Image (cartoon, helix red, strand yellow):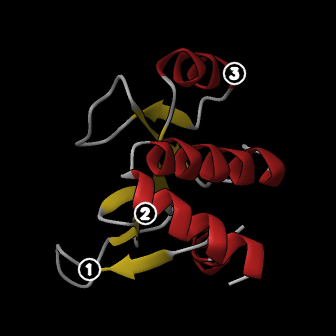
Amino acid sequence: MDREAVLGWCLDMPGAREEFPFGPEPSVIKVGAKMFALIGGAEPVSLSLKCDPDIAQMLRQEFAAVRPGYHLNKRHWNTVVLDGTVPEQDVRWMIEHSYALVVKSLPKRDREELARLGASGG
């Protein structure tokens, strides 16, 4: 799995957009005003995602490539090194989990708008 595939999965989420607040890299993927993914540009590519703290610990124990969030709150963020050792379906699940956690924290008006976007497929 490469950077472009992971970026595409992130941007497929309703209302997701890519920003570059730190320069040309890393890509910061947001929904509403909040980040749910950060994608590094160096090889191997790293992907930082928000995660429920208990699930974060389980993932770190299961996969050597899943580590506490790099330069992020280590309780609530994991950094996944995309070295091929974490199955694609698990990476996709982690992206969806991060997105859902962030959406849940958005104001009701924003959540309702995202629900309309998701229902319309956009």
> Which image quarter: residue 28?
bottom left
Nearer-the-camera pick, 31 or 18: 31
Q: Residues within 10 Å of mark 2 (few under 14, many from 20)?
A: some
Q: Callout 3: helix, strand or loop?
A: helix
Q: Which residue is mark 1?
A: 20
Give the label, 1 or 2, closer to the camera.
Answer: 2
Residue 97 point in image, percent of width and height: 62, 43
Describe residue 98's horizontal placement relative to residue 69 as left or right.
right
Residue 62 badge: 3
Residue 71 badge: none
Could you give the CA–CA distance between mark 3 and mark 2, rounded to whole angstroms? 34 Å
> Does residue 16 show up?
yes
Nearer-the-camera pick, 29 or 105: 105
Q: Which residue is mark 2?
A: 110
**At 32% from the left edge and 58% from the top edge, which residue is drawn?**
34
Residue 19 point in image, percent of width and height: 32, 79
Q: Callout 1: helix, strand or loop?
A: loop
> Where the N terminus falls, by quadrant?
bottom right
Could you give the CA–CA distance between mark 1 and mark 2, rounded to whole angstroms? 22 Å
Give the label, 3 or 2, closer to the camera.
Answer: 2
Residue 68 point in image, percent of width and height: 40, 30
The reply to whether callout 3 and callout 2 are in contact (CB within 8 Å) is no
Q: Callout 2: helix, strand or loop?
A: helix
Name which of mark 1 and mark 2 comes first in the sequence.
1
